[in-house]
Structures are given as C-alpha cells and as structure tokens.
Image: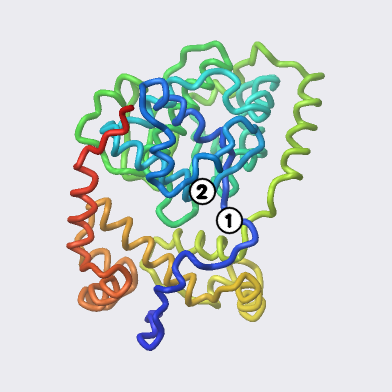
C-alpha cells in the first residue's frame, strides 16, 4: 500500500499541477444546460460565478470554444442543487433541438443508417469531450451503447442522465422512428422517485452500473437515416477532421494516470510500475514525463485520493470505514487524520457540511 509521506504536506499541491492541456469539452455540451436555465428565468451568470467561472470566459457563441471538464461538472452539479431538480439531466436533454451539437451531429445525420452514425459518434466524440469514452457492443438480438468518463468521480447523475436521454431523443429524431429501449443503465444509485425516468424511457431501469448504457434492439442499427447524403457526408467529415486537428493536444500523463487510478475497482493500490506498464512506457519515462508537467506520481496519487474521498463523502452511500478501505488505508483512523489534514474537517463533518449546503435550496431566480 502506498502511504502519504507525513513529512511532506502534499495537500498544497492539489490543483496546482501544471498541464499543457487540461481535459476539456466543447461549450456545445453545456450550452443546453445554460439555455434551459435561462428559459426558466434563472441567472446563468450567477450560476457560473458560483462555481468560480468567469461568465466572460465561456464563449457560448463560438462553436469551437471549449471549457475545462471540471468547470462543466461543477456547473451541472451546482445547477441541480440550486434549482432543486435532481432530474435536471433528463429535463435539459428533452429540450435539445436538432443541430445543437454542430458538425458532429451533421456527421450522424448524413449517415446511411443509425449504426453507421453511431460509429461516427464513437470515432469523432473527442470533438465534444477529450476524455469521454463511447463504445458499442453488438450481441445476439440487442446492442449496448455505453458512455463513461475515465476520470476521478466519473459521470455524476445529471451528466449520465443527460447523455442517455440525448441519445434516445436524438436517435429517434435521426431515424424518424419512435422506438423504445430494451433497458437503460446508470452508474449512479437508484433515485427515490423514478417517475420521470419511467416517463422518459418507458423501459426497465438499472442503477449502480459501471457505465451509462442504452440497450437497443440490434435491428435498429440498420434503420435508414432519411437525411443521408453521401456527397455532403464527405464535406462534413472533412470539417470534423479539420476541427480535430485544431483541438488542443490530447491527455497529458497526469490525466492518463488519473484515469487509470479512477478505474481501480479492487481497492486503491497505486503502483508506478503497474501504471507505467498499462501506459506502455517504462517507469523512468513516466517519472520524466510527470516532471516535465510539473508534478510527480506521488502528487497525482494524492490528488486522486483526495478527490475520490471528497466525492464518496458527498455522495453519502459509503461509510467512512468503507471509504478508507477503498482508498487503500489499513485503518479508518489513518484516513480520518489524512482527510482532516487536507481539508481542516473530519470526514463526518465534511459530509455534514456538504449535505447541509445541498439542502439549503439556494435560489438563482432573477
């Protein structure tokens, strides 16, 4: 087990690692949320400022503008709390109209079939998000379309709900067929009230899964797209390729390590040698790359451990002892001391403060 060196205050490094290209996403991915709130009379600039985001830095009018992944997650989670709508992901997605996702959407709309369009979605998804992963698995009579964020914290409930609902409504619009999913799966826990999920999907629902998944009839993949246009498809694909070339460089090694650590499912046991093997580099090369990015393996591990601890406590599904075990501590008392050193609060005090803040019902009404 990797232990934090008590002689070094690693918490001062949290959030201070220098990256050439932080994980980012297109403003098109958050524009529907801000539009939805604005139409309902909420002050979206107040929302952005509440998350530490300068409203002037979010260029909604620029189709190529991008924002940091962490900013987008903060906007979604804060909006859900402030408007007191835990189903906000479903509701925002239902209001997304044709063309909202720009050239990527046109790449799907000019495809011959839904299956061909989904393959283009998978191939070009980085246009929307640097790190998000999409996968399609075809089985006997069904196909499973999956989405996940291989980053600390994964996809929170509003984001997971938004993605799956956008797929459902978008694919219906694309094919002109009002089809029903065979099953819908979510990585978050089961909500107390499922009425909106049942209304939107009208399908069996599964929760606490590793990924967001939409299970559809396999035959739907061959459904024709009425707007298919082979000639226009070539033009659109050239535009997508050009856009991809202009995007910032891909993940840094810091990002890659965070992704690998976040995907640990058997307990938090960080090993530089093991991570280096997964990334197909030598430990020495990995150490050098991290130094070039202004950080170290120890600092990255510490950052992920702290972020996971805060998220687990905020979600409220695990006991402090369970969180300590998941994060690689041999005793809950060791985790308690480390967490208090990071934040100034005990784990239970931190959880209580977050839950009180979420329940305060702060209003963004103009």
Q: Position of residue 245 (x, y in %)?
A: 76, 45
* Residue 107 in the image: above or below residue 132: above
* Residue 192 in the image: above or below residue 178: below
Instruction: Name the residue at the bottom extreme.
Output: 7
Between discs 1 and 2, the one toward the N terminus: 1
The one nearer the camera, 139 or 67, is 67
Q: Position of residue 352 (x, y in %)?
A: 17, 56
Residue drawn at point x = 27 percent, y = 78 percent: 330
* Number of marks drawn: 2
Q: In the picture, which quadrant includes the C terminus? A: top left
Secondary structure at badge 1 equals: loop
Disc 1 crowd, CA 10 A, few/some/many (<14, 14-19, 20+): some
Residue where numbered disc 1 is placed = 22
11 on left or right of 320: right
Residue drawn at point x = 64 percent, y = 33 percent: 62
Q: Position of residue 168 (x, y in %)?
A: 47, 24
* Residue 87 in the image: above or below residue 6: above
The one nearer the camera, 336 or 15, is 15
Which quarter of the figure has residue 293?
A: bottom right
**Picture disc at residue 69:** 2
96 on left or right of 281: left
Q: Position of residue 265 (x, y in %)?
A: 39, 61
Report if the CB atoms under discs 1 and 2 are less than 8 Å apart. yes
Task: Give the Cα separation between the discs numbered 1 and 2.
Answer: 8 Å
Residue drawn at point x = 42 percent, y = 38 percent: 159
Which quarter of the figure has residue 318?
A: bottom left
Disc 2 crowd, CA 10 A, few/some/many (<14, 14-19, 20+): some
């Amino acid at each position: 087990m990797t232990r934090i060196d008590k002689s070094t205050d690693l918490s001062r490094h949290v959030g201070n690692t220098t990256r050439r290209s932080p994980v980012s996403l297109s403003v098109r991915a958050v524009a529907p949320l801000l539009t939805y709130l604005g139409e309902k009379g909420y002050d979206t600039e107040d929302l952005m400022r509440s998350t530490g985001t300068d409203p002037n830095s979010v260029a909604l009018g620029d189709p190529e503008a991008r924002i940091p992944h962490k900013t987008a997650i903060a906007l979604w989670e804060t909006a859900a709390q402030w408007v007191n709508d835990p189903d906000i992901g479903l509701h925002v997605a239902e209001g997304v109209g044709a063309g909202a996702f720009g050239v990527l959407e046109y790449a799907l709309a000019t495809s011959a079939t839904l299956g061909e369009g989904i393959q283009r979605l998978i191939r070009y998804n980085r246009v929307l998000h640097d790190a998000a992963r999409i996968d399609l698995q075809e089985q006997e009579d069904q196909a499973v379309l999956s989405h996940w964020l291989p980053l600390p914290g994964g996809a929170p409930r509003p984001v997971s709900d938004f993605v799956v609902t956008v797929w459902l409504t978008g694919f219906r619009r694309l094919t002109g067929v009002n089809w029903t999913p065979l099953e819908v799966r979510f990585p978050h826990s089961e909500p107390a009230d499922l009425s909106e999920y049942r209304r939107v999907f009208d399908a069996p629902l599964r929760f606490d899964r590793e990924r967001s998944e939409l299970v559809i009839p396999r035959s739907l993949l061959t459904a024709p797209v009425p707007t298919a246009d082979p000639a226009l498809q070539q033009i659109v694909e050239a535009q997508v390729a050009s856009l991809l070339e202009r995007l910032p460089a891909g993940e840094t090694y810091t990002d890659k390590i965070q992704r690998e650590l976040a995907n640990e499912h058997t307990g938090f046991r960080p090993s530089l040698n093991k991570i280096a093997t997964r990334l197909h580099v030598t430990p020495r090369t990995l150490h050098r790359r991290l130094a070039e990015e202004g950080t170290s393996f120890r600092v990255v591990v510490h950052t992920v451990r702290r972020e996971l601890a805060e998220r687990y406590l905020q979600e409220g599904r695990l006991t402090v002892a369970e969180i300590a075990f998941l994060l690689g501590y041999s005793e809950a008392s060791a985790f308690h001391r480390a967490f208090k050193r990071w934040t100034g609060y005990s784990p239970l005090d931190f959880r209580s403060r977050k839950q009180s803040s979420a329940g305060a019902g702060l209003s963004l009404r103009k």
